[in-house]
Image: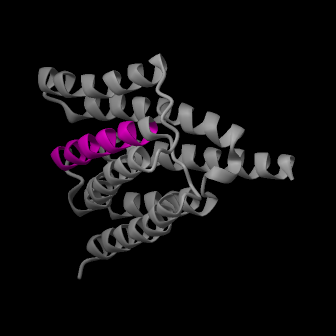
Amino acid sequence: MPIKEILSSIAIALTLYAFFPYIRSILKGEVKPHVFSWIIWGSTTLIVFFAQLAGGAGVGAWPIGVSGLITIYVALLAFIKRGDIKITRTDWFFFLSAMSSLPFWCLTSDPLWAVVILTSVDILGLAPTVRKAYEEPFQESVSFFAIIVVRNAVAIMALELYSLTTVLFPAAVMVFCIILVAVIVVRRRALT
């Protein structure tokens, strides 16, 4: 098995390893994710997956695709389990911005522009979760976001073609997950 396929398999395994305990925590009521953040992340992640494929990412895109599907499931669970469902005008702005990437991609015929828009929206979509993590740091999982950092590093190594189109999204998400972990850890310490 070629190294890129091995790395992609490791990244997918890390995705599953991160999400299953997170999903279990949601089902137990221990974690209450912000539903609209997860809707934004799920939709942007799936669109980026297709843009990465169009940009030549190959098997390195598969961890992003798997993550997108699971992320949509987390959004559904957040809604069903009544996680944080406060939806603001800003949340709607992020969601509509994410959806605007599709016609923009069609108009330009360049997946890079879709990835740039979606990465920006995805990172801005972190705002409700960062706010929630600051206010309720014990309702978020440090280990989940830490594993996603490692997963994205491995997913980047699994890419068959390195370009802004293929690297931007996983690299940006990795950096902002590091920031989110720091917010959660600092706030937990401050509150105990």
State the residue in front, 25 or 147. Answer: 25
Q: Would you place residue 63 above or below residue 129 in this image?
A: below
Residue 183 included in the magenta stretch of the image: no
Against 158, residue 92 (above or below) is above
Q: Which residues are magenta?
A: 37-54
Q: Is residue 44 magenta?
A: yes
Please tell me which residue is depicted at 31% across the width and 46% down the height of the picture: 166
**Quarter of the rendering containing residue 160:** bottom left
Q: Closer to the camera, 119 or 126? A: 126
What's the residue at 34%, 68% (across, down)?
12
Q: Magenta stretch mostly in which secondary structure? A: helix
Q: Quadrant of residue 143?
A: bottom right
Horizontal side, residue 13 vs residue 66: left or right: right
Q: What residue sits 50% from the left and 68% below the top? A: 21
Q: Going 23% across and 82% down the picture, which residue do you hit?
A: 1
Residue 138, horizontal then vertical, whole percent? 69, 53
Spot occupied by residue 65 in the image (x, y as percentages of width and height): 26, 55
Q: Position of residue 31 (x, y in %)?
A: 56, 55
